[in-house]
Amino acid sequence: MNDSDQLAKACADTMWANDQASQGLGTKIDEIRQGYAVLSMPIREDMLNGQKITHGGFVFTLADSAFAFACNTYNQFAVAQHCSVTFIAPTFLGDRLKATATERNRSGRSGIYDVTVTNQNGEVIAEFRGNSRTVKGQHVAD
């Protein structure tokens, strides 16, 4: 692991310790490196809507969490400035979703990240794009 990926992991560890939302949903960090994060989450019964498919808000939340971990890997607090999601296919009880966030551009205080959400069979469930903005603060001491 190189120095930038070690920093990314240290930032993720600090964020994770305080991220009750992601932890409460059963999310796991599967991979982290600078500008990149993979998170996964099981679909539970309390995540289903009235049609017995996963409520879109949970799919969005998983993608948003992966985006957050990817854009916070530089030891600079970053927040969402804008994001959008396109739902492609439904998911069901027992599915395991994976969100892969990849940095597309980082310039000044702004970043653009794409997140692909897939199910356990590798089928694309949703595509998410997030725009980040850095703010004051760091995750770990220099």
Image: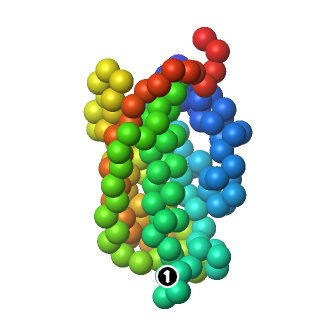
| Looking at the image, residue 45 lies above or below residue 125 | below
Where is mark 1, residue-wise?
53
Q: Position of residue 8 (x, y in %)?
A: 54, 29
* Quadrant in the picture for residue 134: top left
Placement of the C terminus among the 4 image quadrants: top right
Say how the picture is coloured: rainbow
Q: Position of residue 104 (x, y in %)?
A: 29, 38
> Which residue ends up furthest to the top in the rendered image?
142
Q: Amino acid at mark 1?
A: Ile
Query: Can see residue 106?
Result: yes
Residue at 63%, 21% in the rendered image:
140
Q: Position of residue 119 (x, y in %)?
A: 46, 69
Along the line of sight, which residue is nearer the eye, 31 or 41? 41
Instruction: Please tell me whether residue 27 is drawn above or below residue 95 in the rendered image.
Output: above
Left or right: 111 as drawn, with respect to 33: left
Q: Residue at x 56, y 21 (%)?
A: 137
Left or right? Give the position of 111 relative to 93.
left
Q: Is residue 1 visible?
A: no
Which quarter shows the N terminus?
top right
Q: Is residue 23 left or right of residue 71?
A: right
Query: Which quadrant holds residue 81?
Result: top left
Q: Residue at point 34% right, 59% down?
A: 85
In the rendered image, residue 112, in percent from the top left (x then y), is placed at 31, 38
